[in-house]
Image (cartoon, coloured by chain):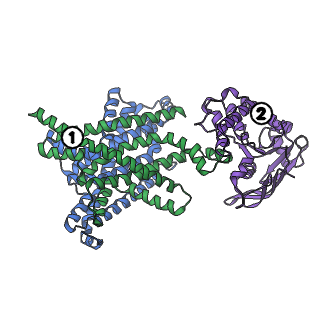
Chain colours: A blue, B green, C purple
Amino acid sequence: MTYQLNFGDLLPYWDVLAWGLLFTVILTAVSTAAGLLVGTGGAWARSFGPKWAGYAVGAYVELIRNTPFIVQLFFVFFGLPALGLKMTEAQAAFLAMVINLGAYSTEIIRAGIEAVPKGHIEAGASLALSRWEIFRHIVLKQAFMKVYPALSSQIVIVMLGSAVVSQISAEDLTYAANFIQSRNFRAFEVYFVAAGLYLLLAIGLRAVLRGVGRIIFPKA
Amino acid sequence: MSDFTFSVILSNLLWATRWTILLSLIAFVSGGLVGLAILFARVSKNRALRLLTSFYIEFFQGTPLLMQLFLFFFGVALFGVEVSPWAAAWLALTFWTSAFLSEIWRGCVEAIPRGQWEASGSLALNYIEQMRYVILPQALRIAIAPTVGFSVQIIKGTALASIIGFVELTKAGTMLNNATFRPFLVYSLVALIYFCLCFPLSWYSKRLEGRLNVAR
Amino acid sequence: MSLVSIRDVRKSFGELEVLKGVSLEVARGDVVAIIGRSGSGKSTLLRCINGLETFHSGSITVDGMEVGGGKTDLRTLRRHVGMVFQQFNLFPHLTAAQNVMLAPTVVTKAQKGEARHIAETLLAKVGLAGKFDAYPSQLSGGQQQRVAIARALAMRPAVLLCDEITSALDPELVSEVLRVVEQLAAEGMTLILVTHEMRFAREVGTKLIFMHQGRVHEQGPPKTLFAAPNTPELAQFVGSLH
């Protein structure tokens, strides 16, 4: 039993933490990119696609939003291989995060699309733009601008939620922390530092997203 | 053979679901109470109190719930107190919930137009009376939808308690998977049960929100 | 003795000085119409009288009570000063009657029966006896504003402040509200109105205050000032309205 906190015992393992942090950052970045693509496609399907596509996407969204991420992760990593789909821990983590963010961003982006005034779409149509062109040049940018704060929030939430991928032994920051404390038994200290690193990541991520937002949407 | 396994799996999962529901309910209530206290501190005139609570909220919203679980599980043990997974999970979920609920509710109070404060103030009502008769009744109406919506997050959050050993629905799923090697079936059922718990609440929350927008 | 006495009041919003030494006396029974361009400080001045805005220099006295400084008990002051707002600000979760009854019940601790009687009398007075149990969302703008007037009157204020109370109304609803105010004036109620309704100011007002750039630029009987403005600014203001 440790009555005295000893953060010094963590120092030899600083590189383990660093690698874990890097993994988390990269995982978040690629999952976000892919997840937003999925979300855009899903939002398009719900707003402009055929009815059956809308229902399918709707079912997907509700399924993901009403089940815990860890269960989705276990399903991907343990369940899918039973169907013959084998994958590494990192791949499973990535896939699960994309599926997860894809569902949430579908809803968020869809709200943005529906907030675009009908008049703008009609104006585009009367200028002889095709449906795809209208979507790409008029609707999408406005939708993103409107829901950018909500999307940013969700990305940070997904980043924090990624801590769970340690449970399938994907070597993220939490996995690194688990590893270290199994070696030096300084559980509280290492989780305290890891929590602090996640907090810094969250703050940093928010700042980066704000900056990106200012560049992409200078008029907002 | 497969029928037997199926019903065994399902009944075990349902048995464990009771713990999920219990933990969710208790965390909601205790988290709500603490959240209320945080709310009053957050909107108070005392600057130190406002600062402290904003740090509190920043911490619990800016770190993974899993980290908070670990910290409570290992942190309490530092004081020599034996902490069960149940207790650590309850503590972590309570503080995590309180941070989110207080912010949700603060948003609802701040959404009440300033004119309501001015009109009630002009009628000589003091702060407590303004809150009690004019502001909070209106804020409550707005708060129900997002509060119900957040309860879904709590239920999903209890799944993490499995990691520190608390036997709820997810942990039962993991144990059953290890015993039967039928991950697809087991986790599908786990997901289905969570869905049955969460979806009605999500749907209700959305319905409340829609009704509110029509009324405006 | 004046009911409301404003002496050399100054107020700034940060760097911007909005009231630059305003002085004004209101006697009991006066109907004071304050006019001027937006930004001239009219609403700010009104809101200083019941403490919704603070001022850092000068003094305001209402019915012997001092406004501002540490000595003011806003609660006591506001029982003697009523306010009606441009945006009505009715409490949407309460009926018209409950809106009117709230302050008497909570602040002056009126009994339920007494409060109800007050609500019945006042709602009848503003012509809305039939809307006793209606919610604000069920009322037109003009009706809502009349309820707001009844609500302010429930506390039996010595002076009623009206902050552009018809500006947010559709034109055809303005007259029903002005009629109520006219009736109050005829009954001897002391009124201070910030208004754009020039015809009303001329017909019903007993004193016209023209504010310009944070000061009282001209004051006097409305009919006289409208017919023959003393300063080019007032002349320009009156001229621009036609």
Q: Chain ID for label 1?
A: B
Q: Residues within 10 Å of mark 2 (few under 14, many from 20)?
A: some
Q: Could you say where residue C213 lies in the image, as x and y percent from the top left?
A: 77, 53
Q: Quadrant of residue B65?
A: bottom left
Q: Which residue is mark 2?
A: C180
Residue at 73% x, 40% y: name it: C153
- Quadrant placement of the C terminus of chain C: top right
**Tag on residue B158?**
none
Q: CA distance from mark 2 to mark 1?
A: 70 Å
On the rendered structure, is A141 left or right of C196?
left
Q: Which residue is mark 1?
A: B13
Residue C167: in sight, yes or no?
A: no
Q: Quadrant of residue A163?
A: bottom left
Amino acid type at image mark 2: Val
Amino acid type at image mark 1: Leu
Q: Could you say where residue B11 lies in the image, as x and y percent from the top left?
A: 19, 37
On the rendered structure, is A136 left or right of C89?
left
Query: Which residue is at the front of the view, A37 or B211?
Result: B211
Q: Quadrant of residue C143?
A: top right
- The relative height of residue C150 versus residue A32 in the rendered view (above or below) is above
Q: Could you say where residue B98 lies in the image, as x and y percent from the top left?
A: 41, 52
Q: Could you say where residue B214 lies in the image, as x and y percent from the top left?
A: 51, 32
